[in-house]
Amino acid sequence: MTSGSWLNMVEILSAIITRQAIRRSTHRSVRELVDAIGRFIDGWNDRCEPFVWTKSADEILTHARSGPRNLLHATPAPSATR
C-alpha cells in the first residue's frame, strides 16, 4: 500500500480540479482537457496564499499523541494589496 502526506495533497488537488475544472465541462479531445487543466492550475497558482498556522508544533504534537481531533487548524494569511 502506498501512503504519505504528499499523496493526500495530490488526491485533494485532484478532487478540486475534478469539481471545479472538469466535471461540468466538455472537451472534444485529450489536448482540450489537458489545456483546461493547465488553465485551472495557472489560475489556482495566481490566487494562492500562504497559510498561517494557529497552533504551534508543540500543541499539534500534544494533540496528535492523545488521538485524532482537529489536529491542524490553519487560516489563510491576510491578503496582500493586489
Image (cartoon, rainbow, N blue to C red):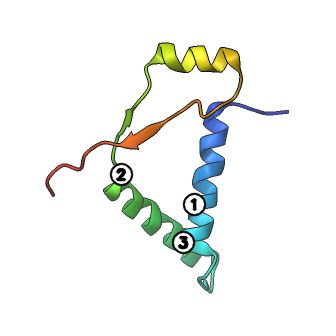
- Residue 57 in the image: state x and y as whole percent: 47, 17
Residue holding disc 2 = 48
Residue holding disc 1 = 16
Q: Residue at x 40, y 42 (%)?
A: 75
Q: CA distance from mark 1 to mark 3?
A: 8 Å
Circle 2: is it few (<14), some (14-19), or many (20+) Cα within 10 Å?
few
Q: CA distance from mark 1 to mark 2?
A: 14 Å
Q: Residue at x 46, y 66 (%)?
A: 40
Instruction: Write down the quadrant of residue 20 in the picture.
Output: bottom right
Q: Residue at x 43, y 20 (%)?
A: 56
- Residue 1 in the image: state x and y as whole percent: 85, 33
Q: Residue at x 57, y 53 (%)?
A: 13
Please tell me which residue lies in front, 18 or 34.
Answer: 18
Describe the element under mark 2 as helix, strand or loop. loop
Give the mark count: 3
Mark 2: which amino acid?
Cys
First in sequence: mark 1 vs mark 3: 1
- Residue 77 in the image: state x and y as whole percent: 30, 42
Instruction: Write down the quadrant of residue 76 in the picture.
Output: top left
Residue holding disc 3 = 21
